[in-house]
Amino acid sequence: MQPRFRSYPLRRPTREVKSGGSAIGGENPIRIQSMLTSDTMDTDACVKETLGLVEVGCEIVRITAPTVKDARNLENIRAALNAVGCHVPLVADIHFKPEAALEAARWVEKVRINPGNFADSKKFYVREYTDAEYTAEIGRIRERFAPLVEICKSRGIAMRIGTNHGSLSDRIMNRHGDTPLGMVESALEFARIAREMNFHDFVFSMKSSNPKVMIQAYRLLVARLDDLQEKELSAAKSDKREAISWNYPIHLGVTEAGDSEDGRIKSAIGIGSLLADGIGDTIRVSLTEDSVHEIPVARALAGLASQRKEALALDAWPFDPFTYKRRESASAIRTGIALGGPELVRVVVKQTTYDQLAHKLPGLGDYQPEIIYEKADIVEIDPRDSSALAKANASQNAIFATIPDDCDLPVIGAYRLLASRLDARHPILLKDVFGTEANHGADFLSTLLNAATNIGSLLCDGIGDAVLIQGEKAPGQSLRIAYNTLQAAGVRIFKTDYVACPSCGRTLFNLQETTARIKAATSHLKGVKIAIMGCIVNGPGEMADADFGYVGGAPGKINLYVGKTPVKFNIPQEDAVERLVDLIREHGRWIDPKTANH
């Protein structure tokens, strides 16, 4: 039976989990995290980078520990930071090596494990598991995992059980598939063992490079935790004992978000949407940039969440919160442009914006205004106005509806309410803000993130047939935000899409330089999705939506993928971008740049 999802009026109540001098969940503010890009064996570089992060507001710092040797050096990093008076909590990031986790747990304040590869470093040949075989597998996990739980308990340090969409075990894949449900069940396998050992100082995460998958996985996780909580309360009452709650804190993040404006928009859609649902106690924005640039974005998202109005109680959810399906509106024509139904999600502008852009249209390329608001016969409806709704629903023709600017409801909640009360056949125009002065005085980053959160969240809900950015006054920038949000939400692809991971101590090449080179060679390939991964630690499934992958295989060597399948190995890095172009050409996806520009 599918668990029930609900958003929280302000913020989901959670237990407090302490990580050194920082506490996550409970009454604490949303905590800001980042991850070092420096080699873990370079103590001085790690200390310098950590101090730089703390200076700009980072509250928790994660460091990769790929081997026992790296894990052992965390002692030196911790001691050097303490020596200069920096006591920021350190988190050891562990993949594949339980022995590295045991060593790291001696020196840091928190350990992050990936349940997909902590005890499953080898692939199994069994493709279907009987209940007895599955139970035996859980016993094997317990054997590998219990020592880490014991040391975390004895030292009083925390843990993050962090699932990655790309690295689910064969056991999970064969029972649940490469799905949000599989991600949730993967984490719960480990959580149940921790609870049986009376260890509760842990945090969950459900990361994916696809915002839709990420949102669905977190919602499903929280719904499952709520369901388990109800069952625990019932069992505790029956057994006449104190209930042990399942209200563990949640860490939010979109993996491989990329860089520049695209990376910020994709992060806002994933993280901001969940914060708007009241979910999330700590966040990390993963950008293919120097780590200090992640902090202002994370702080801005947390700030927007803290300012949000109380969420509305809906009559009924107008969408399935765990599965994406676009709302089934009817097609309509406005100013010669088709919208609604199977049509593209359109970009609407106000007349004043169009007038400012009219002389620039030939140079705007794909960033074109498509519908002018004042000429589109748009019907403004307050979702609380029953008479206006009744009139609209009685109309024989599909109307083009939106919410008036004087509406005092939160944007996401207002459109969800409208979608739940307006017949599905009527197309809906989404606005990023209500009132043209709603964002007056806000800086561009806040405007960008607010627009991406509000519109991106609704698009991922399946709501919306057109979008209007009115919080950003610069006409060119408002158009760019609209189109980039549509692309990041995966509802309209009009340019090359990149999945690019942030750097860390595992990275086998310079990600920023390589990403720039790949973009220079391929940015004209509209509709092609390319993954750029410093290593394959998060699993090839993290590139599930990508057409082609460029992945670090060894120092100086690159492996190329088609989808999740590696097809070319150990290519010298200096030749790899050219070989990637050859691979795209082999699969019929290459277009000459001159042809693409005409």
Image: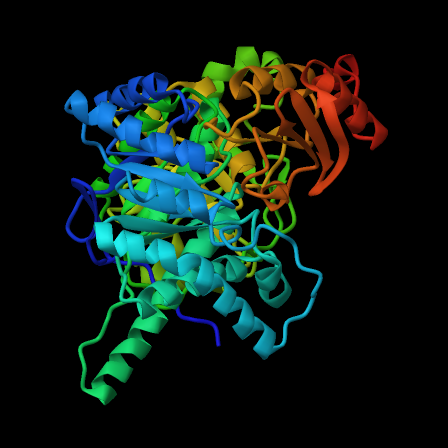
- Residue drawn at x 35%, y 68% is 315
Asked whether, in this view, residue 557 is left or right of residue 397, the answer is: right
Determine the residue located farthest toward the bottom in the rendered image.
238
Asked whether, in this view, residue 274 is left or right of residue 18, the answer is: right
Placement of 204 over or under 126, stated as above or below: above
Q: Position of residue 358 (x, y in %)?
A: 53, 15
Q: Quadrant of residue 333?
A: top right
Q: Quadrant of residue 52?
A: top left
Q: Is residue 573 visible?
A: yes
- Residue drawn at x 36%, y 39% is 92
Placement of 19 over or under 576, stated as above or below: below
Asked whether, in this view, residue 178 is left or right of residue 446, the answer is: right
Which quadrant does the C terminus fall into? Answer: top right
Q: As rendered, which of 283 and 240 lies closer to the eye?
A: 240
Asked whether, in this view, residue 93 is left or right of residue 562, the answer is: left
Q: Position of residue 192 (x, y in %)?
A: 38, 67
Q: As rendered, which of 198 and 53 lies closer to the eye?
A: 198
Q: As rendered, which of 556 and 30 lies closer to the eye?
A: 556
Q: As rendered, which of 552 and 486 lies closer to the eye?
A: 552
What colour scheme governs how the chains and residues are painted in the rendered image of this protein?
rainbow
Q: Is residue 464 visible?
A: no
Q: Position of residue 104 (x, y in %)?
A: 35, 40
- Residue drawn at x 54%, y 21% is 511
Q: Position of residue 362 (x, y in %)?
A: 62, 13
